[in-house]
Amino acid sequence: MFKTWMQSPSLQKWLALYEGWLQQRTPREKQLLSGLLVILVVAILYGLIWAPIQTNHQKAQAKMAVAEEKWQWLKAQIPTWEQQGKASPSLKLSSQSALMQYVQTQLKQQNLFQAMDKMTPQQKQIDISFKSVNAPRFFRWLSQMEQQGLSAKTLQVDLQAPGLVDAKVSFEVML
């Protein structure tokens, strides 16, 4: 393909015009043109190859530094999380009825009882579903439940509208 392009009549015509023009130049002008050509090639190589590589390298280094900072922060948090795990209260509700009563009380305290769609007792757990519940209030309630030692076994949340979610949560009886 390159060979075909080099043999094209239009390119041959341009090369002939260039050679005629170049022969009319003095040796000093030819040297200046050669120097200009070298500078132009270097500038093109810099602009098309070197500068983008350097820019991307600097961006990658910046991302790496941010990731390293996050990693260091995360490593520093591990002892805190381990202590929180040991210090968190463990709520022991030994029967399904005790669990249901406790959950209902907490729902009423957070004004979420009316938003509850249904509460279904299963073998050793209860499943609670909500339709179009206030998301901040729901997650506040879920957080309080966890802080009191009752963690959700499963959680499914679907966004319905800004600030409203459908949710299904399961709690297990702790023996």
Image (cartoon, helix red, strand yellow):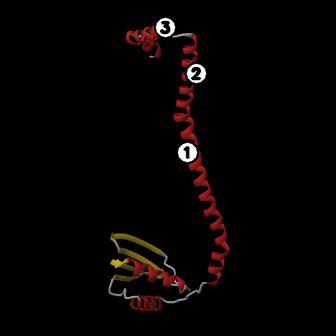
Residue 65 picture location, percent across and down: 62, 56
The secondary structure type at the circle numbered 3 is loop
Which residue is denoted by mark 2 in the rendering?
A: 35
- Residue bearing mark 3: 24
Amino acid type of disc 3? Gln
The three-letter code of the residue at mark 2 reads Gly
Could you tell me residue 63's position as x and y percent? 57, 54
Tell me the CA gap for discs 3 and 1: 45 Å
| Local crowd size for mark 1, using a 10 Å CA cut-off: few (<14), some (14–19), many (≥20) | few
The mark found on residue 171 in the picture is none
Mark 2: secondary structure: helix
Q: Splitting the image into 4 quarters, where does residue 1 fall?
A: top left
Residue 17 vs residue 71, the one in the foreground? 17
Against 9, is 105 above or below? below
Residue 108 picture quarter: bottom left
Q: Amino acid at mark 1?
A: Asn
Residue found 50% across the figure and 7% down from its top: 23
Give me the disc on residue 56: 1
Q: Foreground mark, 1 or 2?
A: 2
Who comes first in sequence, dot 1 or dot 2? 2
The answer to whether 62 is drawn above or below residue 16 in the figure is below
Q: How many marks?
A: 3
In the rendered view, does 117 fall on the left or right side of 96?
Answer: left
Residue 138 quadrant: bottom left
Mark 3 vs 1: CB contact within 8 A: no
Q: At 59% from the left edge and 59% from the top edge, which residue is drawn?
A: 66
Q: Which mark's residue is nearer the viewer, 2 or 3?
A: 3
Return the disc, 2 or 3, that comes first in the chain's sequence: 3
Mark 3 or mark 1: name the one nearer the start of the chain: 3
